[in-house]
Image: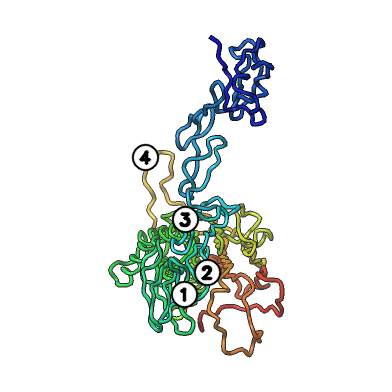
């Protein structure tokens, strides 16, 4: 029985003038059809990404060589990807390795393995994290946002990346667009909180944003509308345990000791290391706990110092301090310093603690250390000024980890007698009252020698130097100046334009000259170099602040 084996559905449009009978008439040549023996491959019988190849030995005189992932006589069937969800590759499957904690879909491209964002997420350019679109349903046309900017498709009159605001401060977003509210402030979204419609002159109190606890306040002004939200009293979840510990010590429910100090600084480092931005109560809690720890440790001696029992104590302490001294916390410090000592007290407490470390360094066998953070560098080390390159701290050429270039201020100590000196032998007369030791050894002389013994006194120890560099402290200290300016004329708008450097030298041996002669040299890096004139060296006077 003869039949036409050509797939008619793929017959090109420009050949439709041929009749079905003419195609199906037998042609004596394999791979050709019709009375005119039309080449089957010219009729494009193969589907998808494939190639028609004449092959006289085949049953139809031609074959379809299918592209990847297709099969069948005409390559009409698609091969389902063999890899399960979360895997990719062909023929061997491998894991996608897409970080779902950064907003990526666990399932990647089956061919390339490339990760993609979850549905309704976007990924800014040059970033490795996807963020939720969070389009406001009433103000946006859909939940999908721009894959790179995160901009949601807003309805007419609605603004904001998430389409949750109106350009009129007295209007609120509704299903039909923005509508003006006349009797008060409209329902509005700000700082992660939906503020309810509120009458003029009244405050609104709401729970703090997601990921924090406490109460946020916002006032409705009859002239300006909504004022900026007040979130100072919010506390990030990572700081809640620390806040509880601080409150217990404030009420004398618990007291500071070495173990508690170690636990506090470990929790502080963990909390600050896992928090991108701080609320006011985060900074206040950290400041008060650091103050308690530093005050307690400054009163300890010898092996009662927690640093002698915890190798990570000093680093946790400095990193926590550095975190809350970030320039981004300036507004919080301004509010804290209205009622507390704030940054000036924190400076004093770090100075007192490092002085205690210097006094106890030799007797506790503490190793010299340099701790480098984004906003602080602390050096506690033995000082040998007889070697010039060893008489400067910090020694930045020995620091291998990253540090901001704004921190590159240093202290150069003068040359003074810090080298251990060998003391001449002293003749020490043996006491005649000392009883001779008795032993059975026959060769030992049991009589007390009348000869003098010679002892060499221990050499004088090297002094210990402490240098602390605060990168951002100058912008956080309260703007208080000595009212007696007879010895110093400040410019009209003074600005702290360098890091703040604190240093001390402690000597267990012979006392050092005071003041050191020649004087200690401090080398500063200017934070701003443009439009700056009349540099003046100043210091913070704790006694009058």
Where residue 2 sits, quadrant-wise, is top right
Rounded to the nearest angstrom, the CA distance separating label 3 from label 1 is 22 Å
262 above or below 84? Answer: below
Rounded to the nearest angstrom, the CA distance separating label 2 from label 1 is 10 Å
Residue that label 1 marks: 171
- For the residue labelled by badge 4, is the local secondary structure a helix, a strand or a loop? loop
Q: Residue extending furthest left? A: 253
Relative depth, front residue between 508 and 36: 36
Whether residues under marks 3 and 1 lie with C-beta atoms below 8 angstroms apart, the answer is no
Residue that label 3 marks: 143
Rounded to the nearest angstrom, the CA distance separating label 4 from label 1 is 106 Å
Which residue appears at 56% of the width and 66% of the height? 468
Where residue 196 sits, quadrant-wise, is bottom left
Choose the circle earlier in sequence order: 3 or 1: 3
Which residue appears at 71% of the width and 80% of the height? 534
Whether residues under marks 4 and 3 lie with C-beta atoms below 8 angstroms apart, the answer is no
Residue 396 is situated, as x and y percent measured from the top left of the image, at 64, 58
Residue that label 4 marks: 440
Task: Point out the frontmost of discs 4 and 2.
Answer: 2
Residue 295 is situated, as x and y percent measured from the top left of the image, at 42, 70
Residue that label 2 marks: 157
Residue 281 is situated, as x and y percent measured from the top left of the image, at 41, 70
């Amino acid at each position: 029985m003869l039949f036409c084996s050509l797939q008619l559905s793929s017959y090109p449009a420009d050949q439709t003038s041929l009749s079905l009978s003419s195609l199906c008439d037998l042609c004596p040549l394999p791979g050709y059809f019709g009375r005119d023996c039309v080449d089957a491959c010219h009729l494009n019988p193969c589907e998808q990404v494939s190639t028609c190849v004449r092959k006289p030995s085949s049953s139809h005189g031609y074959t379809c060589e299918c592209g990847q992932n297709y099969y069948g006589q005409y390559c009409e069937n698609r091969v389902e990807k063999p890899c399960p969800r979360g895997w990719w590759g062909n023929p061997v499957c491998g894991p996608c390795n897409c970080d779902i904690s950064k907003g990526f879909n666990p399932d990647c491209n089956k061919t390339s393995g490339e990760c993609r964002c979850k549905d309704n997420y976007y990924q800014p350019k040059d970033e490795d994290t996807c963020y939720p679109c969070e389009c406001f349903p009433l103000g946006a046309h859909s939940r999908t946002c721009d894959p790179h900017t995160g901009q949601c498709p807003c309805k007419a009159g609605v603004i904001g990346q998430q389409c949750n605001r109106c350009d009129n401060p007295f209007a609120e977003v509704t299903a039909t667009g923005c509508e003006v509210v006349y009797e008060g402030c409209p329902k509005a979204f700000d700082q992660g909180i939906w503020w309810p419609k509120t009458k003029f002159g009244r405050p609104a109190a709401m729970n703090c944003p997601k990921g924090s606890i406490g109460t946020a306040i916002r006032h409705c002004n009859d002239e300006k509308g909504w004022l900026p939200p007040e979130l100072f009293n919010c506390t990030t979840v990572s700081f809640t345990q620390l806040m509880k510990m601080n409150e217990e010590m404030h009420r004398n429910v618990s007291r500071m000791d070495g173990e508690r100090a170690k636990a506090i600084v470990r929790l502080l480092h963990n909390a600050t290391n896992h928090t991108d931005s701080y609320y006011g109560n985060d900074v206040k809690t950290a400041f008060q706990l650091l103050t308690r720890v530093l005050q307690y440790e400054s009163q300890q001696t010898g092996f009662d110092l927690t640093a002698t029992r915890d190798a990570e104590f000093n680093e946790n302490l400095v990193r926590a301090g550095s975190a809350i001294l970030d320039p981004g916390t300036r507004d919080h410090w301004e509010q804290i310093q209205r009622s507390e000592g704030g940054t000036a007290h924190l400076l004093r407490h770090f100075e007192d603690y490092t002085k205690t470390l210097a006094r106890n360094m030799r007797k506790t066998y503490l190793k010299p250390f340099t701790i480098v953070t984004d906003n602080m560098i602390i050096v506690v080390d033995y000082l040998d000024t007889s070697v010039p390159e060893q008489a400067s701290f910090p020694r930045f050429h020995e620091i291998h980890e990253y540090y901001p270039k704004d921190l590159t201020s240093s202290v150069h100590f003068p040359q003074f007698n810090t080298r251990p000196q060998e003391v001449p032998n002293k003749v020490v007369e043996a006491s005649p009252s000392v009883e001779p030791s008795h032993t059975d050894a026959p060769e030992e002389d049991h009589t007390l020698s009348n000869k003098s013994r010679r002892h060499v006194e221990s050499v004088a120890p090297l002094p210990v130097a402490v240098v602390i560099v605060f990168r951002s402290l100058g912008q956080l200290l309260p703007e208080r100046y000595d009212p007696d300016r007879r010895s110093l004329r400040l410019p009209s708008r003074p600005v702290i334009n360098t890091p703040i450097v604190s240093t001390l030298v402690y000597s267990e041996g012979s006392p050092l000259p005071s003041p050191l002669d020649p004087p200690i040299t401090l080398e500063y890096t200017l934070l701003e170099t443009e439009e700056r004139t009349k540099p003046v060296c100043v210091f913070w006077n704790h006694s009058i602040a």
